[in-house]
Amino acid sequence: MNDKILVVDDEESLRLTMKLKLKAAGFDVDVAEDGEAAIERLKNQKFDAVLLDINMPRMSGIEALGIIRQQFPQTETIMLTGFADFSTAIECLKNGARDYLVKPIDTTELITRLKSLLRSKSSEQALFEVQRQYSSIFFNDLLGPLKEMRDSLEKALKLKGKSDTTQREKLIKDVHDKCDKIAKEIQMLLDFSHTEIEKKTSEGASINTTELAERLKQLREKVK
Amino acid sequence: MEFDRGSRNDDREPDRESQDGAHRMNEERKDIIRYQYRFEFEQGVETNFDVDLDSHSLAILGDDDAPKPAWTKLNFNQCENCPLSSEVEYCPVAVNLSRIVEKFKDNVSFESTVVTVKTHERTYVKKTTLQKGIASIIGLFMTTSNCPIMDKLRPMARFHLPFATSVETFFRSVSTYLTAQFLLSRKGKEPDWTLARLLEYYKAINLVNKGISNRLAKASERDANVNAVIILHSFGDGISYFIQDGLEEIEPMFSVFFENLEGPVHQDVEKPSASTNPIAR
């Protein structure tokens, strides 16, 4: 299914030209003439990204951006700025817009930025899915040893004051080993997060979730 | 207020508008094409621009006293494809635009305005955004400026359509170009029915639009002027997509030409003689 884009601009010629360009690049496109109309469109159908002009009558792009971020957080926003709008554009980025383009808009740049944004969005979604699936597995991995440690410590406490310390020392060593294992597992997750995922997302590369899940599985086995 | 000059402007109080422009226009010389633009703002202010064109050459008339601020110099943010030599001191497009740019440099693009355009034949009135109104008149100024690149659009000034939609402008562009090709073939030259050269022209025109918008950004405090040029840029930018996809959308309207064609059409296009031309008969 094609990515769906909403073009919001008060000028009809700009809306039509962008629609023609984006359709030719393989996107599904709808248009709205101002912020209010854009919010109505978003209420009725899901869009992957919105191209949002800043200076518009009735509801400005900045107001619309605030509503989009609040009510439609899965929809990405690229601001379209004209003359002397740079500081406003930067403000929009701080308020959740993902990018901005300066008019007159270069077609190649528009398509490249949009595709890059949507690729990164789908990578983030895939990553979120992997994290969701594997977080329960890793919590179980941690929960088992923690319960065993608690049992060992309870037993060790009961042996306090006994002349034979061998059993007690054995229990404490068991707790120590399990602490090591948990620490290794946590470190492995941290390392994985820093090196593999961050590197891939910062490069803007799409994430192969199957490969990612396999790497996590291998590391988990290694720690065990 | 004078009306025997080319492009000029003045601001008037509404009560002075009782002077009837149509009456004056009836007294004008027939060889002048005149477009009278009036912008009425909500605060009661009016701004007027008259554009006079020579009806044969479509050259702008009587604008020798146009202001020439620093941003109109040719080498000030010169367009990257500008063919003019450094001997030319001023950018012809910028000079043609100077009066309107200076007038609206402090205005916001989406400011509401009622624009009235009077011609010899009719009057157009539209409540619109300032950027759309400026884009309409700027298009006239740019195409009649003697810029060698914008000159390709000059015939469109004769059939100027104020506040045209994108599709209307695309259609006028294609129609004008195809008319030029027909006239070319009648002269025994090779016409371009594929519109390939039209796209080449628009590539160059887009660079000029981009250059002019950069120039105007330096000359204006607010965005009305720049956004007006951006609108014109969007027409040029969209025409290749219109030819590719948009023409298909309007194709059904022409179906009457595709049906019941009997036999081959005479291929050699010649200037009709009095005996073959039903109008001349």
Image (cartoon, rainbow, N blue to C red):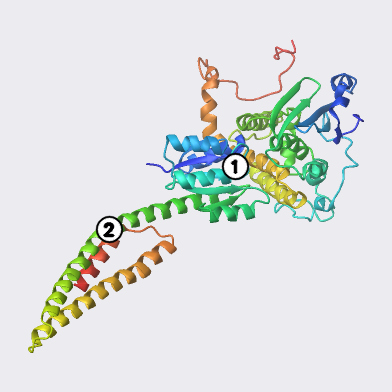
Question: In the rendered view of the protein, which quadrant contains the N terminus of chain A?
Answer: top left
Residue A143 occupies which quadrant of the picture?
bottom left
| Residue type of the residue flagged with mark 1 | Ser
Checking the image for residue A60, the label placed there is 1
Which is more toward the observer, A94 or B91?
Answer: A94
Q: From this viewpoint, which residue is outermost toward the top? A: B281
Q: Residue A93: image x %, image y %?
A: 54, 55
Question: In the rendered view of the protein, which quadrant contains the C terminus of chain A?
Answer: bottom left
Q: Residue B238: image x %, image y %?
A: 59, 39
The residue that label 2 is drawn on is A210
Going from N to C along the chain, the mark reached first, 2 or 1, is: 1
Q: Residue B43: image x %, image y %?
A: 77, 33
Above/below status of A183 relative to B27? below
Name the residue located 73 percent from the left edge and 41 percent from the top edge.
B150
Which is more toward the observer, B151 or A79?
Answer: A79
The subunit letter for the residue under badge 1 reads A
Q: From this viewpoint, which residue is outermost toward the front? A: A161
Residues at marks 2 and 1 on the same chain: yes
Name the residue located 44 percent from the left edge and 50 percent from the top edge.
A118
Of tags 2 and 1, which is closer to the observer? 1
Above/below status of A175 relative to B32? below
The Cα–Cα distance between marks 2 and 1, rounded to whole angstroms, is: 42 Å
Q: Is residue A47 visible?
A: yes
Above/below status of A89 relative to B124? below
Above/below status of A32 relative to B213? above
Name the residue located 27 percent from the left edge and 58 percent from the top edge.
A210
